[in-house]
Each structure stands twice: as structure tokens, then as C-alpha cells.
Image (cartoon, rainbow, N blue to C red):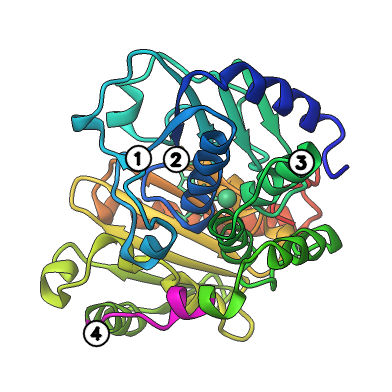
Amino acid sequence: MYFEQLSPAFGTFVDSVREKKVVVVGHARPDGDCIGCQVALGRVLRAMGAESVCLNQDPVPRRLDFLCPEEFFVKPGEWKPEGHVAVAVDCADPDRPGVAVRDLLAGFDANIDHHISNTGYAGLNLVDSTSAATAEILAGLFLDNGYPIDPITALGLYVGIATDTGQFRFPSTTPRVFEISGRLLHLGADPARASRCLYERESLEKMKLLEAYLSSLRLECGNRVCLGVLPQDVFRKTGAGPDDTEGLVDYARSIDGVDIGVILEDRGVEIKGSFRAKDPRYRVCDLARHFGGGGHDCAAGFTVEMPFDSFYPNLLKVLLEHFREVDSGGDKQETDGGK
Ligand code: 5GP
Ligand code: MN
């Protein structure tokens, strides 16, 4: 058994929805773990007799469309929630799916997630923050219960694990990650195909966005922070889309001597920010939480409604204070998330 506590509860839940309609909800601006989990859970529920659909506020990014060979995803405006059991995946709190989805649903019957900041907002909360990805939990729950994992389900789960571990490079990459991934390969997941689909289909527009981001990079906090800004008009100028920001911040973190990489998207009325740390001791989820967001020790994000010019000095102050606290050993508990 991979999840001795969670798997029996998951089995009971699946038994209770076999004849029902289920909506599998993901978060706003969905990533590989989110879409991989939605596809996988949707398919397994169908195989077990339920009628399932996947619901997101934002569309499936083009990068991940290879996981969705059939019409599986519904949009908030074109779908009626009546009679559906609602399950959230990869969502730390009930607001993560976004306003359009939150306003549509009365609440969640189940919540499957790996964020340490998960608020336990559903009827059934299957949360394990020692897992590198929600897909790792889901794969374990399927395997423990002996549910059918077809090659597309296996690929979705593999992509969730591979993307959330930064291709098996982050400290969250445990022996269990490799064990479960190995099982998924036996069940038909193809890592070479996943990697080709994920990373060898970039657009020229995305490269131009990368160029804009790289040229904006600057060092702050005694060169321990590398930070880049995407100005308001950058998407119009480059032709890139909102999903094309994925992965840019990794370049800022990759610089020698830098502890934390930052990307700030200036949207005029609000700022979307992401933090990436090399080491979990920098607990960037605490930084993100400071601005109303959340995430993991090494990867976290937030959105604040504030003009850029007043936000920036505040961010630098918070970063310096955070370094002081971390360097002094900190008075906060070590967390086990985002390892
Ligand atoms: P990203 O920086 O790629 O948007 O997100 C990195 C991590 O932080 C993800 O695990 C994501 O779930 C989390 N995250 C990003 N934005 C938010 C936010 O606004 N609120 C919360 N709670 N988590 C976020
Ligand atoms: Mn995840």
C-alpha cells in the first residue's frame, strides 16, 4: 500500500459515486499536475461506472492538449452543476479554481491534494503533503485500490509527477516518486513522448516572451534574488499568451549564487507573482502567503491588487526580512511540503 490511510477512504468514495455524475475540478491557470490529475481521475471514474467531466475556469494550455484526446473538459458558462458530485484536485483552498468555478459550485465533496497549505475544505480531504505531486497521490490511490489505469491515464499521472518534480530534479523526488513512475511506465506512460509534447513544441512567441523576461532580469538582496518583470503590454508586443509564462522564472533561479528567482507580471490593476527557491529552507510559500498566495517550500505564487510602483519596494522589504529570519535559523517550524 502506498497510502494506507487515504486509499480505503478513496475506495469508499469511488463506490459511492459509481452511478452518479461527477465533476473533477482543477485550479485556475492549470499546470501539468492539475490537468494530468483531472484527465486521470475523470477516466478512472468513467471506467468505474460514473459519468465524469472536468471543469476549469481557464482553458487547457496548448502545451498539455496531448493529454486530452477527447471532449472531456467543460467551461463554466456552458455547463450546469445540478446533480454533480464535485471533486477538486491540486487545489489548496476552495478559491484556487477561480471565481467563475467557485460561483458555480456549492462546495466540494472531496479534495485530493499535496499542498501543505491545504485548508481541508471538502467533505472528504485526501491530502498528503509528503507527495511531490497530486498525481503521485492519485496514482497511489488507484494502484492501492486496483483500479484500471489505461495508457492515457498513466501518461497523465506521469506528466503530473514529472512536471511538479521539475523532471525529477526537485528535493521532492523520493524513492516512492520513482517507484510509482516506474509502475506508470509499465502501464503505458511514455517519458520520451511526454517530454517531446511538453518541451519540443514551443512557439516563436514564447521565445520572444522569454527574451523580454531575460532582458528584464536584475539582482536584488545582495545578489541572492534574481527578479524579472513582464510589463503590461508584453503579451501584445510578443504575441505570446498567458500560459507562455510557464517556466520563465526557472531562468532567474538558475543563476549561480541566487537563492530565490522571481517573476512579476504587471497587469495594471493587479500583479501576479511567482517565487522559486533552490533550497526548501527558503520556504517561499511563506513569502507568497504574505501576499495572500501560497504553494510549496520551493515554488509558490500569489496575486495582489496593487499598482506595481507601490508593490515593488514592499516586496524588497519583505524579501530582506525573510532572509534575515531564514539565516538566523527562523522561529517557524520546518515544513515537510515541497521537499
Ligand atoms: P506558480 O508560481 O507556478 O503560479 O505556482 C507555484 C505553486 O504555488 C503552485 O503549487 C501553486 O499551486 C501555488 N500558487 C500559485 N499561485 C497561488 C495563489 O494565488 N494561491 C495559492 N494558495 N497558491 C498559489
Ligand atoms: Mn501539484
- Quick one: label 3 or label 2, which is nearer the N terminus? 2
Question: Per the image, is 237 magenta?
Answer: no
79 vs 226: above or below: above
Q: Secondary structure at mark 4?
A: helix
Q: Position of residue 83 (x, y in %)?
A: 38, 13
Q: Which residue is mark 2?
A: 26
Q: Tell me whether the residue at label 2 lies in contact with that at label 1, contact meaning CB atoms closer than 8 angstroms.
A: yes
Of the residues shown, which amino acid type is indicated by label 2? Gly
Spatial CA span between label 2 and label 1: 6 Å
288 vs 263: above or below: above
Relative horizontal placement of residue 230, taking residue 159 as reference (left or right):
left
Crowdedness near tag 1: few (<14), some (14–19) or many (≥20) residues, C-alpha within 10 Å:
many
Q: Position of residue 108 (x, y in %)?
A: 50, 20
Of the residues shown, which amino acid type is indicated by label 1? Asn
- Quick one: label 4 or label 1, which is nearer the N terminus? 1
Badge nearest the viewer, 3 or 2:
3
